[in-house]
Amino acid sequence: MDSPFLYAVTDFGSTAVLIPVTAAVLVWLLFQPARDLAAWWLVAAAACIIGTAALKLWFFVCPDPAVHSPSGHTSLSTLVYGLLTMIGAACSDGWRRRLAAGLGVLAVLSIALSRVLLGAHTAAETGLGLAIGLAALAIFLCARSAMPWNFVHVRPLFLGVALLILLLHGQQLHAEELLQSLGVYMKASGAACA
């Protein structure tokens, strides 16, 4: 299905948008009372990005009929929009908390569904991306039990994120092509599959 609307939705999950948003969240967390959360965010983001890239390489080198490449749009969207949803919900109450949670889930699921409807990924590949993102988000949530989530100055975070999304929406990094080329090189170099 080729639709401008679906492309607009899927572009919210582009690495060209979400890598800068990830960096903005990191900077914002450095100015929070529990600065250690920034380190946890860095670990979670690295796990998501490196985990997705490593699995993409794996499937390029060792093809599988069911999964060709996990959805990076879905994995990073799950992590980034998942955390933004949790921050929004933590700083709200009542109907605002439910609205924040609902919008966050809708955003992630819309991006994931757009990947399938556009034919960029299968349902299995999108599900794998979702699992990677949830695992990375779980890494960050480990910090919640270790330290309080006393967020201050939340408005600048959301304004900065909105500005980044407006400026970068529609941009592409084409990391998939780079990873695929690297996978082809590794396969030609004799990389073995387990």
Image (cartoon, rainbow, N blue to C red):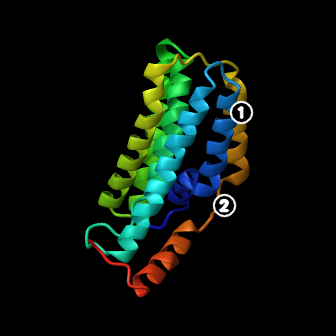
Question: Which residue is tagged 1?
Answer: 159
Instruction: Give the secondary structure at mark 2.
Output: loop
How crowded is the residue under tag 2: few (<14 C-alpha within 10 Å), some, or many (20+)? Answer: some
How crowded is the residue under tag 1: few (<14 C-alpha within 10 Å), some, or many (20+)? Answer: few
Up/down of 165 relative to 65, above or below: above
Q: Position of residue 13 (x, y in %)?
A: 54, 52
Instruction: Give the secondary structure at mark 1.
Output: helix
In the image: residue 159, left or right of residue 191: right
At 73% across and 50% down in the image, what residue appears? Answer: 167
Badge number at residue 171? 2
Report the front residue among 131 and 112: 131
Q: Looking at numbered disc 1 in the image, what kind of residue is underneath it?
A: Leu
Q: Where is residue 104 in the image (x, y as percent from the top left)?
A: 48, 35
CB under 8 Å between discs 2 and 1: no
At 42% across and 66% down in the image, what residue appears? Answer: 56
Up/down of 48 relative to 80, above or below: below
In the image: residue 15, left or right of residue 47: right
Mark yes or no: residue 88 visible.
yes
Q: Where is residue 129 in the image (x, y as percent from the top left)?
A: 39, 53
At 55% across and 33% down in the image, what residue appears? Answer: 84
Mark yes or no: residue 120 visible.
no
The C terminus sits in image quarter: bottom left
Quarter location, residue 88? top right
Marks 2 and 1, how far apart at CA: 20 Å
Mark before the other along the chain sequence, 2 or 1:
1
Report the front residue among 129 and 9: 129
Q: Looking at numbered disc 2 in the image, what kind of residue is underneath it?
A: Gln
The N terminus sits in image quarter: bottom left
Up/down of 177 relative to 46, above or below: below
